[in-house]
Amino acid sequence: MDKTTINVSRLSKSFNGQNVVRDISFDIKKGEVFGLIGPNGAGKTTIIRMLLDIMRPDSGEIRIQNDKLCDEIKNRIGYLPEERGLYKKLTVFETLLYLGALNERDSKERAGMLLEKMGMFAHKDKKISELSKGMQQKIQIIASIIHDPEFIILDEPFSGLDPVNMRLVKDLIIELGKAGKTILISTHMMEQVEQMCSRIFMINKGEGVLYGSIDEIKTRYGKNTVLLEFEGDLKNIPGVKKMNNSGHYAELILESGTDTQAILKNLAEMVRVNKFEISTPSLNEIFIRVVEGT
Amino acid sequence: MKKWRIIAKHEYITNIKRKEFLFVTFGLPLFFLAIMGISFFFMGIGGHNEENKMGYIDRTGLFDSSNLTKYTDEELARKDLLDNKITNYFVIPENYTATGKIIIYSSRKNFADNMKIKEQINNFLLDNLLKNEPPDIIQRVKKPIDSEYFTLNENGVKSEDSGFSIVILPLLFSMLFTLSIFASSGFLLQSVIEEKENKIMEIILSSVSHEDLLKGKIVGLGALGLTQVLIYLVLAAVMILINPAALFFIISQIHISIPLLAAGIIYFLMGYLVFASIMAGVGAVATTSREGQQIATIFSLAGAFPMMFSEFIISSPNEGLAIALSMFPLTSPIAMVMRLSVTDVPLYELLISILVLAVSAYLIQEISARIFRASLLMYGKKPTLKELIKYVRQN
């Protein structure tokens, strides 16, 4: 059975003669958490805006459940834009009801339930302008799922969040994923995606560079990475192609055919090894390799 | 429910609570009424209430009066004036019949009073100068003409009003009319820019199409404008009920006909559509509300052009400038309503004007919708004219 629910094919968009998105194709399967990743300015937000029909592509096609985007499907999409904002003069409750109504849902009960869950129920009759920034972000996240959408698109959901709210949002995403929602997370924070997404599409300068399941991509790049925790002064070791050294922690990318035992022996003579793990490269590292073409 | 209706309802409810709306709707008419009321008071009703106690000094020996106090000694008159026994006195010099010169002294300075005083003195002088004439002649000299105008053309004879109402009432009417159009399209500008500045625009567009958003805003705020006009009419009705004297005055002076009302509504709706569409486009292009207001002012000035030339339009409603202004789509709603309220506009002119306005309303709305779609989310970047033309061309 084909579980594809969002299908993007050969999408291109340019502004003022500059290609922002070039010939992008990917599928999102029903019920998966999909990562759209890439550095800032890669074209992620433009792709999302085209997905939502906020912008029209120059060429290419987007189909959701084998259909073009219409009001009925828009009602089943929840969206948290990167540029956050709400009506300043409306109260929390008024805002949520209006945004729910725009998706043709009476969201009175659900608004109460979600506010309760996010610890915001006491503030429901306050004006948005009276809330702190963190509270406003929580309201925005609630607003994006107020109509119990099937598809949830989150653009940089972690930007500007403190650790407590970051945890809250992560838990919420995991919960929504378990509930069978199809979720698209767009972010430049690749570590976050590694923990939550099953499949990714990686974009750089408007072009797709990697696409597939995270496990599959990582194996493709080989188990040739050593994750190291150490004390001491780490210098170049023969057999290591590249070293990302952050003082007490390092990622060593090995030349093909290098014996990891020999590396460990070399390391032990040089520094005090606290942890030595043979692993697949991180998404960050894969991304850098892809971009640098090595 | 169609989504544009949800938006229309939301816009209507949030904007009707705006301070600006309440001010334009209730504050301004009350202000106008207050000004009108004051002038009514001095011109009519007030005039009979309180007679001035007047004295005079006659150096010609020709004048006599039962109403006014005659003084022979000017010192005494001055003293009585300062003691408030009289409010004014005047001196008729010896050479009055040759020069017509009268010197008036008054304890207060008041323009409306001065008019009354002059009228009283005028009557006093005429009564004396013409004391040998029969009373009806005296009356005719005091008010020699009571005019009634007719215009004569191929279609027959038509009576026309003259005087006060012909200038003030159409002017007031078109002022409130203009105000409603500008106020509601101004709210539209504000609401678009606010949603852009709040950054909530993108969330809304993820649920609603650009077309529905634009339609909802235009309908919701248009309904607000109609509400405003309705409130103006109710206020006018209340004023008339409270003050029957004003009722008679207005009924006798104004001729609001059914065709005028019908044309008024048509011009209101289409004029609003034109300005609202322009404001939506301006709001989509502008990056800040200040910039938006600045661009909008250019269009508002063009729209208010007939107000600046209202004197000309009202005094010669069937001449070149008035006709031109009542054809050009930005100015025609106001100019034509002004013309209609003072004269008979030939039917073909009315039809051409409505047709031009309807076609432009449609075109402007189409162009605005495209600009709206293309530039709504270009935060912090104002498109160039070239880009705007490109947006309009592509679809």
Image: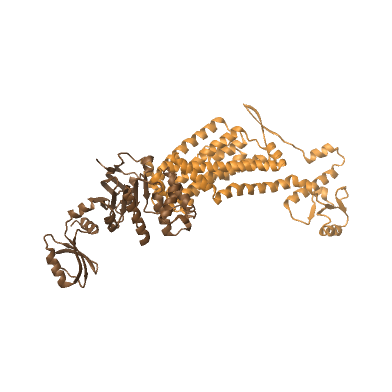
Chain colours: A brown, B orange
Q: Nearer the viewer, residue B283 or B66?
A: B283
In this rendering, position of residue B272 left or right of residue B153:
left
Answer yes or no: is residue A160 visible: no
Q: Which one is in front, B186 or B57? A: B186
Q: Residue at point 72% right, 52% down?
A: B111
Q: Quadrant of the C terminus of chain B?
A: top left
Residue at the spot 13% in from the left edge and 64% down from the top edge: A260
Q: Position of residue A64 (x, y in %)?
A: 31, 42
Q: Is residue A83 above or below residue B276?
A: below
User: What percent of the width, then of the height, locates residue B150?
Assistant: 67, 32
Residue A245: x percent and y percent?
A: 22, 67
Left or right: residue B377 versus residue A30 is right
Q: Camera-side residue: B320 or A28?
A: A28
Q: Position of residue B123 (x, y in %)?
A: 81, 45
Quadrant for the N terminus of chain B, please.
Answer: top left
For residue B151, side relative to residue A255 (left or right) = right
